[in-house]
Image: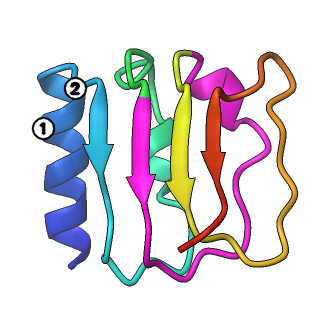
Amino acid sequence: MASELSKTISVARQEKHKNLFLNYRNLHHFPLELLKDEGLQHLERLYMKRNSLTTLPENLAQKLPNLVELRTAVSFVAYCCSTQCLQSFDLLS
């Protein structure tokens, strides 16, 4: 699963996707590969529903500055971007 995830993120970075779907991946941690380098700054929508995340990175807004929509099920996390508020932030699964 990890190599499939890496490949998906790599393709999104290379092809400058605006939407990235990481739903149903059984993720327990936010994939830090999403925050590496400058390759995903164009990302606007990130879908991570039906995973097992409990936290989000503090530097999410800085690393993904164009992110306007994040759909994820995050247990007991309150999150607001420090540089901008997401237009749509769905904490439901």
| Secondary structure under the numbered disc 1 in the rendered image | helix
Q: Which residues are magenta?
A: 45-65
Q: Nearer the viewer, mark 2 or mark 1?
A: 2
Q: Quadrant of residue 65?
A: top right
Q: Earlier in the sequence, mark 2 or mark 1?
A: 1
Q: Quadrant of residue 40?
A: top left
Locate the N terminus by quadrant.
bottom left
Q: Position of residue 15 (x, y in %)?
A: 12, 22
Looking at numbered disc 2 in the image, what kind of residue is underneath it?
Answer: His
40 or 84: nearer the viewer: 84
Q: Position of residue 13 (x, y in %)?
A: 24, 29
Q: Is residue 10 above or below residue 78?
A: above
Q: Residue at x 17, y 68 (%)?
A: 3
Q: Residue at x 83, y 65 (%)?
A: 77
- What numbered label is drawn on residue 11? 1
State if disc 1 and disc 2 touch (CB < 8 Å).
yes
Looking at numbered disc 1 in the image, what kind of residue is underneath it?
Answer: Val
Q: Which residue is mark 2?
A: 17
Q: Main secondary structure of the magenta part?
A: loop
Q: Position of residue 25 (x, y in %)?
A: 31, 76
62 or 83: nearer the viewer: 83
Q: Is residue 59 magenta?
A: yes
Q: Position of residue 76 (x, y in %)?
A: 84, 75
Q: Quadrant of residue 42?
A: top left
Q: Residue at x 66, y 62 (%)?
A: 91
Other residues around mark 2 within 10 Å, as few (<14) / some (14–19) / many (≥20): some
